[in-house]
Amino acid sequence: MIEQTYTVQGMTCAHCAGAVSREVRRIDGVEAVAVDVEGGHVTITSATELPDAAVAAAVDEAGYTLVAGR
């Protein structure tokens, strides 16, 4: 399993976390998603390394901005 952590801009509440989590879970290979709203981070566990572009597109679809990997 691979764990990747990203910084996401604009999340402020549990609804934000749910929206981001739902969209990221749609990426093929994602096993788990953990969202830290206070820290502005999303940690994704997957079978293989995910392309940053796929994660950025999912976060964008949820209405937020992927700032950077960590």
Image: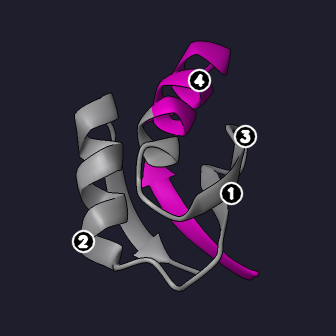
Residue 44: which disc?
none
- The three-letter code of the residue at mark 4 reads Gly
Q: Residue at x 67, y 37 (%)?
A: 37
* Badge 4 vs badge 2, beta-carbon distance below 8 Å: no
Q: Residue at x 24, y 71 (%)?
A: 53
Residue 19 highlighted magenta (yes or no) = yes
- The three-letter code of the residue at mark 3 reads Glu
CA–CA distance in space, label 2 to label 1? 18 Å
Residue indicated by mark 1 = 31
Q: Regarding mark 3 in the picture, which secondary structure is present there?
A: loop
Q: Residue at x 61, y 55 (%)?
A: 42
Mark in the foreground, 3 or 2: 2
Label 1: how many residues lie within 10 Å, few (<14), some (14-19) or many (20+)?
some
Circle nearer the N terminus (3, 2): 3
Q: Quadrant of the C terminus?
A: bottom right
Circle nearer the N terminus (3, 1): 1
Looking at the picture, tell me which residue is in the foreground, 34 or 11. Answer: 34
- The three-letter code of the residue at mark 2 reads Ala
Position in image of residue 19 (x %, y %): 48, 25
In the displayed structure image, the side of residue 43 where residue 50 appears, left or right:
left
Residue 18: which disc?
4
Circle nearer the N terminus (3, 4): 4
